[in-house]
Image (cartoon, helix red, strand yellow):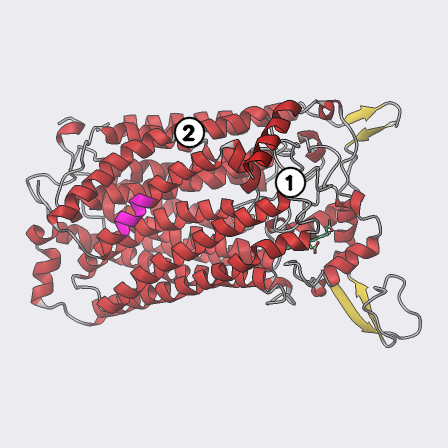
Amino acid sequence: MNRGPYLFLGAFVILAFSWTAAILANQLGYGAVTPYYDDLAGQSFPAKQPGIVARGAQVYTDLGCATCHTQQVRRADLGSDLARGWGERASVGRDYIQEHTVQLGANHIGPDLRNVGARIEDVNSFYQILYSPSEDSSMPAYRFLFEETEITGEVSADALSVNSTTSHQVVPTERARSLVAYLAHRNDTYAYPETNFIPPEPEAEEAADAEEEGH
Amino acid sequence: MDSTSSNTPTSTSQPDWARIDASVKVPVLFFIYAAAAWLVTASVLGFIAAAQLVQPAFLADCAWTTHGRIVPLARNALIYGWGFNAAFAVMIWMVARLCRTPAPKWGATLVGGLFWNAGIKLGMAGIIIGQSTGHFMLEMPAYAAAIMFVSYGIIGAGVTVIFSRRREGNMFASQWYALTAMFWFPWLFSIAQYTLVFGSLRGTSQAIAAAWYGHNVYALFLGPIALGALYYLIPKRVGRPITQYPLAQIGFWSFVFFGSFGGLATLVGSPVPAWVQTVGISANFMLLIPVFAIAINLGVTLLSGSKAGGSGPALKFFKLSVLSFVAVGGLSVVLSMPSLSHTIQFTFVGEALDQLHWYAFASFAFFGAIYFMLPRLIVRPWPSGALVTAHFWASVAGAIMIIGSLVLAGFAQGAAINDIEGYPAFADVVAASSGYLVALALGYLTLIVGHLAFFVNVVMAIYQACFSKPSDSAETVFSAPAAMEVNS
């Protein structure tokens, strides 16, 4: 341990090994994952993201929505995600392969959004949540994604219904529109072959029983 | 000489410490100053982020200060601003001393330091205006990262020059940590930038790379430098050699090896291959080996030294730092047990562990090192003892409040999320943890007080060093080898 060269050789080997195992092996593994072509539906899943959705993903990323929201649904034995209705199935790697910047997130300060597009169908609700989220949540309002304009002549077609008055209207900006398109597109309901696995049910139930008895 | 025969960094012939210290004075003081300034910035940003969790409307009307941007700003200021600058200061000074070699007259280190800090500022400005890359700990846009990479190279080259001219061939544990860390970071950073920011990774392998990089900034850079400082300074401070020094080698190699995989444990339950998660959990478990070895080396040395009556702010910070290091190792294993992780995964508990790792372990080690090092560089005592005391107690109180409230908030949040009948609406879940988040914000306010005290003391010290002559007594206290260094 007293010779520089041995130290640096050891250091190099460790980092190289760690990188090969953690990054390279996964990259090679993922390289083999492709969209799944469904003969019946005549299209591939996950589908390519339309341009507006990709732009919305950028808005989601640069506003840091992922500090409060995850986008990953865990198996039933690992958490209550499915029970809370955050998805019909656990997320799998294939769900993400069309995304430029994957935003898994790490804290449930707000609900998981991986399937929010399946939960909330009316785009106006999305605008509403962004413009004035519920009072007793910690989600900040994103007023700067909207423009408040005086009504001259016709009311704009996409003015928010609730917050507009007779003289003023609240109109989403281009960024708000793409962000909402992105949110509406969060919908991983398609079942891939690998999502049909059976989770280790009996064990999970036992654990749940044990927990109930504990209380 | 074999490694076991030299278990303290000092040997019988005392080199001229004062000359070595003087040779690194300018860049090291600059890094300490920059670190302290970033530390204040980071705690202010941390306070804003915590306050926004309590009061979402706070600074919400402007895109620049929205919560989702303040959080990465606070993290970047803390890690790259405070952490790296402090690490540079410790690394340069420690390597020069351990190699018993004065640094060559080379202004480039200072230039590298200026550019490093300019790079962070530019990167943070990028995040503010919406150019975040969206990858954890790599949020700063590529142009800023490029500046940081080059300036790191300049700073690292300076350290390499010192190392290559070393007069002491025998390498002490501190050097293993400091020098390997210095070589690891540029690899980590460039691999992560190349694969993530320039976008060649697909799908959730991005998340794996980000977890790997983010954790390794702790495990292979900041953590090792903090440990290096502890190995170097604890024996000096307590006046005893490292207990069971041969364990240090086992500690070092197992820490860096298993540590380099620890980040993968954060991906449990995520849509990544199952073996990735298993590797992460096993690595955290295996990390108990180095934690144990290092705890014996450092902890037992500290305990036996307390009887010998060592004291002072440096030693107090070192004790807490070692304690937190052991706590991180233990908690990472305990909290990854399925019965607990079922509740606390994706809650504030994750951030609590980060803060314990990063603030209570690494930052406290840096604080202690700076308390030891700065008087020797300026050949004067710290300007204000009261500010030292204020800094110590406010940091300790702030750390306890922040980590404690994050843990409590996380458990409340996780339990509420899993209890669907009790907390059907998400607003109920939010309410379950909101009380603790008030304590979190107060914890950050406490930290601001402590960090301001530290910053003011640093500024006064540097001011004195530039504009007044040291007294003769300071000369003997802070540069006479006998009083400063411990022989054993």
Question: B235 or A60, which is in the foreground?
Answer: B235
Identified at 36% across, 63% down, the residue is B451
Question: A190 or A6, which is in the foreground?
Answer: A190
Question: B442 or B160, which is in the foreground?
Answer: B442
Task: Say how many tags the image has.
Answer: 2
Identified at 73% across, 32% down, the residue is A89
Residue type at the position of mark 1: Val
Question: A86 or B38, which is in the foreground?
Answer: A86
Whether residue B23 is visible, yes or no, is: yes
Chain ID, mark 2: B
Residue B356, relative to residue A170: is it above or below?
above
Q: Residue reaching furthest right?
A: A154
Q: Quadrant of the C terminus of chain A?
A: top right
- Please provide the residue range marked out in magenta: B317-323
Chain ID, mark 1: A
Crowding at dot 2, Cα within 10 Å, few <14 / some 14-19 / many 20+, comes out as some
Residue type at the position of mark 2: Phe
Which residue is disc 1 drawn over? Answer: A102
**Residue B151, image x, y percentages:** 41, 49
Query: Do the residues at pointers 2 and 1 share their chain?
Result: no
Identified at 60% across, 63% down, the residue is B64
Helix, strand or loop under label 2: helix
Mark number displayed over residue A190: none
Which mark is nearer the camera, 2 or 1? 2
Helix, strand or loop under label 1: loop
Residue B150 falls left or right of residue B9: right
Which residue is disc 2 drawn over? Answer: B285
